Amino acid sequence: MTTTDQQVAPDLDGLAGAWLDQFQGALRNGTATATADLFHPDAWWRDLLAFTLDLRTAHGHQALAARISESPTGPVSIALTGAATLVEAGAEPWVQAMFELETPLARGRGVLRLVERDGAWRAWTVLTAMDELVGHEELTGTRRPLGGAQGEDRMARSWTEARRRQQEFVDSEPAVLVVGAGHGGLGLAARLGCLGVSTLVIDRGERIGDGWRNRYDSLVLHDPVWYDHLPYLPFPASWPVYTPKDKLADWLESYASTMELNVWTGTELVDSARQDESGEWTVTVKRADGSQRTVRPRHVVLATGVSGTEPNLPELPGAEEFTGLACHSKDFPRGVDFAGRRAVVVGSCNSGHDIAQELFEKGAEVTMVQRSPTYVVSVAGSAIAMTGMYDETGPPTDVADLLGASFPFKCAPEMHQATTAAMAEHDKTMLEGLAEAGFLTSSGIDGTGALQLFLQRGGGYYINVGASELIAQGKIAVRSGVGVERFTPDGLELADGSSLEADVIVFATGYKGMLETARRLLGDEVADRCGPVWGLDEEGELQGVWRRSGYDGLWFMGGNLALARFYGKFLALQIKADEVGLAESQNLSEGRTA
């Protein structure tokens, strides 16, 4: 914001401090009448557990007034931390400030944005986020364990023997059973462990990391290292910017060891039931040696990925006639020489592009079938959205996470549109080449790029690591805007009546979602009592994931590495609150609270 001789630059700390004092008073007294003085009419307040013990967003005066009046009244302390700053990122500058908060239940942090309209500085966005439960803080830092065997085992057993008994749950039952030892499940187990909640993680892979290790050879993370750190244990400074999948698999294995996580690999859930009266699950698992074990946790968490584990494989007539290899992307064979073979990849998002590129590099003649437009951005273009946040010179990861979360998912679409437009300008040559090759591109939902596609659909985009150039150069052929009708003996018939000859057909058509994994593992009765899992609710928060699912004692954990790192903390805090009776004391009903 520029100033003239007649204008005086505002006292940013004074503005933010005065607003926080007024907000603190409104919360202490439940005075919803202060809403119009505090907030502009289109303002947003996002609360991550601090006042609601849920993930909630209020938008507009009516919802904001209700949120203030519903918040527990009493001692609330809010104080500015650091200096407020003036941000000029668009047509309307804002004052941005970070603050600390404390209630009888929680300590946390927040982010405030004030804008000046009609001569008055009021809030545009506010984030309040819990960091810890008062009296139940993480066992980290000054609260870290002493080391060695603890408690009654201190004199009798070595650390190694104590860990063996802990890992096998010889003397106790796990409070939490996590299904899935990917980055989400392991990160959540680490959070729970630091909260003193005993947790068992099971995974059907032979080794931790096999979910990555067993995928197609060319897979590399499309997000940079600064965005992908795991809780408590960031990647080393020498780590490559983009992580190869086998390197990540090995890191997850070492992470589980370093964080002392209790993981049973080669283990599958075979039966489960929950007693409503006791709140206890009875879960039978089959272990790698063929033996069965029954555990009785109070919480079950499905951490099997945003898309779940059930392949979305189209049922096409004529499959028995096809004489070549047909598979879903999850079963794409590794290390096979495809030289001279005709390959068709059905699907045009990340997996479809990666597999098409790998097939080409292994000597195949490749055609991609693209049924609908795809949002495409280059790796360098996608970095535009992370500049100053997740890069070598950005703030600490926890601060970047907090700043990112302080924009509610439905807030300021024009900012995402502007960033998406800037990415498209950066990628202009690439996008023009795709268009000339007949590949259909989009700008995402309402021009917002990959973010809303991920939040609402779980996919629909490609971050280019080389396949787009191959398409533009005609090295990977494309059939766009057409679906697949049936198999033929030597390939596929498309919906427009044309056909493609193929020796290999790979369906990169995604998965059915986490709820269908719950249906397979836990049964129809459990799945039917859950609400939707993934996609945005009316408030703009993700449904059923990182929060109560609708079936008490069942939780869903998902998201890319960054989302899992940040939101896993809130899932762990909710489970801890249940374990110590705080959720019950706050009169939270079973199931979904929103």
Image (cartoon, rainbow, N blue to C red):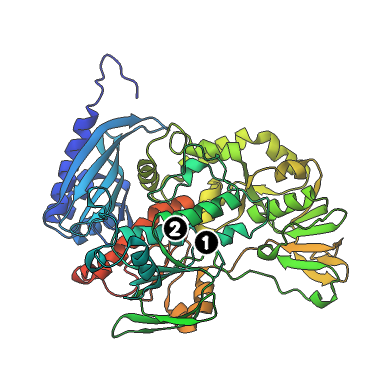
Residue 328, by quadrant, is: bottom right
User: Quadrant of the image for the N terminus?
Assistant: top left
Q: Position of residue 414 (x, y in %)?
A: 47, 42
Near-viewer residue (154 or 52): 154
Q: Is residue 452 left or right of residue 219?
A: left
Residue 577, by quadrant, is: bottom left
Q: Residues within 10 Å of mark 1 (few under 14, many from 20)?
A: many
Q: Is residue 11 left or right of residue 385?
A: left
Residue placed under numbered mark 1 in the picture: 208
Count of residue discs: 2
Please give the label number shown on residue 25. Answer: none
Near-viewer residue (300 or 543): 300
Please give the name of the residue rendered at 57% of the width and 49% of the height, measured from the top-left corner: 247
Q: Position of residue 350 (x, y in %)?
A: 64, 52
* Residue farthest along the top direction in this orientation: 5
Q: Is residue 509 above or below residue 75?
A: below
Residue 548 appearing in the image: no
Name the amino acid type tagged 2.
Ala
Circle 2: element type: helix
Mark 1 and mark 2 lie on one chain; the one further toward the N terminus is 1
Please give the name of the residue rendered at 68% of the width and 62% of the height, measured from the top-left corner: 329
Residue 325, by quadrant, is: bottom right
Q: Gap in Å between the C-alphas at discs 1 and 2? A: 8 Å
Residue 72 appearing in the image: yes
Q: Is residue 205 left or right of residue 346?
A: left
Q: Position of residue 243 (x, y in %)?
A: 57, 45
Circle 1: element type: loop
Near-viewer residue (132 or 128): 132
Q: Is residue 357 left or right of residue 52?
A: right
Name the amino acid type tagged 1.
Ile
Please give the label number shown on residue 256. Answer: 2
